[in-house]
Amino acid sequence: MKARLKTIAISAFFAIAAFVTVTYSSCNSDKCKAIVCAYGGVCKDGACICAAGYEGTQCEIVTREKYKGVWSVYEKGTYTETTQYQISIDYGSDMTKMIVNGFNNNITQPVNIRISGDEITIPQQTINGYEIQGKGTLKYDAFYAKHGQLTVRYTIKDLSNNMTNDYGVNTGEPSIWSK
């Protein structure tokens, strides 16, 4: 009777161990089974890898929506006095490109920017006789969805007199854009 009870106990132990192993293996073999990634994102090892222009746990955030709109700018360059003005940021040619209208309060054509998550890049470009380039970082207020602050460091070189106005790249203060 002892041997029979021992055999039943060992059999039960191995049956439970096999069940746990199969269950554990099947759950872990497809970590993406219950995950849905939006906007063309792809699940890998239980996490979404988002397409360019999207972010979030499940790629549910359209990155450029954080930037679109009217921003109040406060800035002081190395050669200019403190000034305040408004700009607007609008969609560009694809999900990672946008345009800035009213840049530096005197550029009459749109300035191109690239966005990636909470960072912008102002690629070097010449507009209206000015050479512009820089970078910025967004502090986005998720609680108040349409609010945020961009700290932008850029230079604008006047090609007619070769003077460079610096907004926090090497000297000067960074430009602060708020909405």
Image: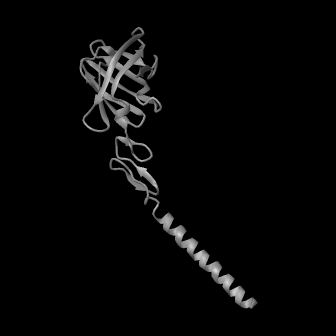
Of the 4 image quadrants, the one containing the N terminus is: bottom right
Q: Is residue 93 left or right of 39 when viewed as pictured?
A: left
Which residue is more in the foreground, 14 or 176? 14
Q: Residue furthest top?
A: 81
Q: Name the residue located 41 percent from the left edge and 55 percent from the top edge.
A: 43
Query: In which image quadrant can residue 114 be found?
Result: top left
Q: Name the residue located 40 percent from the left edge and 42 percent from the top edge.
A: 55
**Image position of 78 with respect to 26: above or below:** above
The answer, for residue 162, to whether it is visible in the render is no
Q: Name the residue located 39 percent from the left edge and 23 percent from the top edge.
A: 154
The answer, for residue 160, to whether it is visible in the render is yes
Which residue is more in the foreground, 113 or 168? 113
**Image position of 46 with respect to 161: above or below:** below
**Image position of 57 with respect to 145: above or below:** below
The x and y percentages for residue 60 are 39, 44
Which residue is more in the foreground, 11 or 168? 11
